[in-house]
Image (cartoon, rainbow, N blue to C red):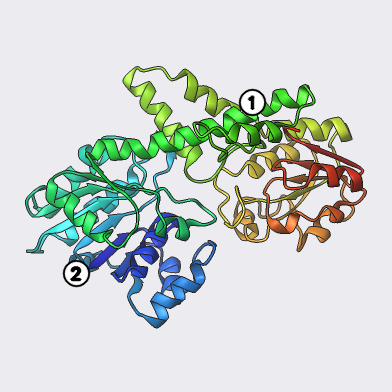
Amino acid sequence: MNISVVGSGYVGLITAVGLASKGHKVVCIDIDQRKVDMINQAEPPFYQEDLEQVLHTHVKQRGNLRASLDYDEIAHSHVTFICVYTSCNNGSNADFSAIKDSSKKIGQAIKGKQEYHLVVTKSSVPPGTTEEIIMPLLQDHSGKKAGKDLGIAVNPEFLQEGKALSSYLNSDRIVVGQHDQKSGDVVQEIYSDFHAPILRTGLRTAEMIKFASNAFLATRVSFINEIGNLCKKLDIDVYEVANAMGYDPRIGRSYLNAGVGFGGSCLPKDLEILLHQYESTGEKSLLLSAVYQVNRLQPVKLIEITQKRLGNLQGKKIAVLGLAFKPNTDDIRHAPALELIRQLLQQGAKVIAYDPKAIPKAMEVFPQELEYGESVRDTIAGCDCVLILTDWHEFKDETMYADKTVVDGRRTLDPVKAKQVCRHYEGVCW
C-alpha cells in the first residue's frame, strides 16, 4: 500500500520506518527542510535504538521510504497518517495549530483525487479532536464526504522511547478508532502483518484510550515515588517493596522504579491536557491532579539532598550525568534534568553536564549557561557533587565514583557497592 506520513518527528518517523519494514511504500511529508534532507540521506534526525540501520535499509537499499516537503504527494498515496506533535498552550490546553494546518493541507492535496482516501490520526489528541476539528477541516478543504470518498480513523501510538521501533513492530495491541466500517477495515488491512490484537472502537474512545493509558502509567510512577519518599524516612528500601509488590499479577513490576519522576514527550503533556479536559467539563480530578503535583516536586528532592551535603551551592561545581529523560534516546522534552539544572544555576552553582546522546539538544536550551563534559570521568573530575539523572548503562560502574559525593535519581548504581567506594552515596528515595 502507498502510505504518506505527515510529520517526521518521533512518532512520524518511527511509524514510517515501521510501515516500510512491513513492505509498504512510504513518503514522509514535513515542513522542515533539514529533516527531509537527513531522512533522504538515511540519517535519523534523532536517536533511537536501531533506527539508523533500519532507515538505511529502506531509504538506500529497498527504496520504499523517502521524505518530501511537497504535500501534493499525498494524493499519490492511499492512506495518510497525521503524526504532527501536539504541544501544550500555557502548560495546560492542547495547541492545535499544527493539527489544523496539516488537516487543511491534506484536504487541499486530495481535493482533485477521484479515488477513496483514508486519513488516520496518530498524533495524541484529546477526545473529540478528530471528530470536531480534523474531520471538518478535511471535508471543507477536500470537498469530500467522510464515510463516502473520505475515510477517517484514529490509531493512537503506544511507543516506548528508547526502544520505539521495537515497541511499534511488536505492539501489545493496535487500537483502531473508526468513523465508519470501511475506514476501520483499511486500517486493519495495513496492520494485517502485525502479530497483535486489533481493537476496533469509535473515534473518541480510541483517543481516550491513549490518554487513559498514559495517565495510569504516570500514576504508577508518582505512587511509587510517594511510597519511596516515606520509605526513606523509615529506613526501608523501596525497591525491595516494589519487587515484592510486582509478584502480584494484579499489580506487576513495571513503572514502579522510584526516583526523580517521569518526563518525556508523552506522560507530562498528556496528563496536562487530560487535566484541562476535566476542568473544561466541570469534572474534578483529585487523583490525577495529585499525580501531576507529586511529579513536579520530586526533582526538588535532589536539590535538598545536595544542599544537605554541601550547604550553600554558590560557586559549587555540580556534575549532572544524564540529560535525556530516559536512556537510549536523545529526547530532553520534560526531562527532570532540565528543571534541576535551572534551579542549580539560580542558586549560583557551576554545572557541568554529560549525556551520551542528548548534549546537542541540551545545548539548544543551555548554549552558554553550563559546561559539557566529554565522558563520565571527564565530567565528574574535580566536582563537589555528582547528580545522576538518567540510568545510561555507561554510568553504572561504581568504581568511577570513588571518593565522590553522589546523589542518584534513578537507582543507577548498586547502593551497597556505591556506599563502599563513594565518599557519600544517597538516592532520592533510598
In the figure, is residue 95 to the left or right of 146?
right
* Sequence-first tag of 1 and 2: 2
Residue 9 location in percent, x, y?
A: 43, 57
Assign a secondary structure to mark 2. helix
Residue 369 location in percent, x, y?
A: 71, 50
- Amino acid at dot 2: His
Observer-nearest residue: 279 or 205?
A: 205
Q: Nearer the viewer, mark 1 or mark 2?
A: 1
Residue 223 location in percent, x, y?
A: 58, 28
Q: Residues within 10 Å of mark 1 (few under 14, many from 20)?
A: some
Image: 46 above or below 176:
below
Q: Quadrant of the N terminus?
A: bottom left
Quarter of the image holding residue 87? top left
Residue 378 location in percent, x, y?
A: 82, 60
Would residue 292 be seen by someone viewing this image from the given angle? yes
In the figure, is residue 424 to the left or right of 163?
right
Would residue 94 be seen by someone viewing this image from the given angle? no
Q: Which residue is mark 1?
A: 226
Which mark identifies residue 52? none
Assign a secondary structure to mark 1. helix
Image: 166 above or below 313:
below
In the figure, is residue 281 to the left or right of 420?
left
Q: Which residue is mark 2?
A: 76
Could you tell me which residue is drawn at 47 percent across and 38 percent down?
Answer: 269
Could you tell me which residue is drawn at 90 percent across and 53 percent down?
Answer: 382
- Amino acid at dot 1: Glu
